[in-house]
Amino acid sequence: MIYNEYALKLFSVAYNSTKSAAVAEEIVQEVFVSLWINRKALVITSSIKGYLLGAIRNKAFDYLDKQIVRNRYKNNVIKTGTTSDNSTEETIEFDDLNVAIKKEIQTLPKTTRHIFILSRFKGFSNSEIAEEYEVSVKAVEYHLTKALKHLRVYLKHVYLILFLLTDKF
């Protein structure tokens, strides 16, 4: 019943974001499969329509982010004719970056750290995190902003390295 009522509208939202019917169909399918799998544990405090639209937007943004990375990689391969010039060096730099970021994340206050990890590493939406912690979405946004601000201030050198690595693409 929910599928019949919202699938077309959700497809339209996904299609407007991705400009691909196949991708839009896949995103809608993923959202409904997730809804079905989590149906017993899922607590929706807003409307089902709002929840589904948020889930579609999040999936579409994830898809677009991945496309940007793929395009950069593809352009690098076309430009250089190789998949990687210094794969060992880049792997070591990447590992060092990950260690630095993880250490800095551990310095965040407990709630801010947990919310940041759920959002950025486990793919939870702000509303899902708000439900989990029984706080408002605004409180979740506050913690995410606080975490990102902290990471920007204390990891300037990491951003410089990321910029230099990204600039290669």
Image: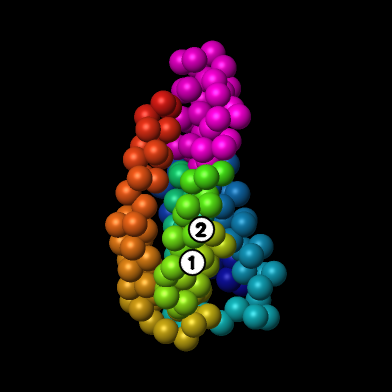
Q: Which three-letter amino acid code belongs to the residue tagged 2?
A: Lys
Q: Residue at x 53, y 40 (%)?
A: 94
Q: Position of residue 117 (x, y in %)?
A: 51, 65
Residue 28, image quadrant: bottom right
Q: Residue at x 49, y 82 (%)?
A: 133
Q: Nearer the viewer, residue 115 or 52?
A: 115
Q: Which residue is mark 2?
A: 102
Q: Is residue 6 visible?
A: no
Quarter occupied by the N terminus: bottom right
Residue numbers of the magenta segment: 66-94
Q: Is residue 82 magenta?
A: yes
Q: Residues within 10 Å of mark 1 (few under 14, many from 20)?
A: few
Quarter occupied by the C terminus: top left
Q: Main secondary structure of the magenta part?
A: helix
Q: Is residue 31 magenta?
A: no
Label pair 1/2, CB-CB below 8 angstroms? yes
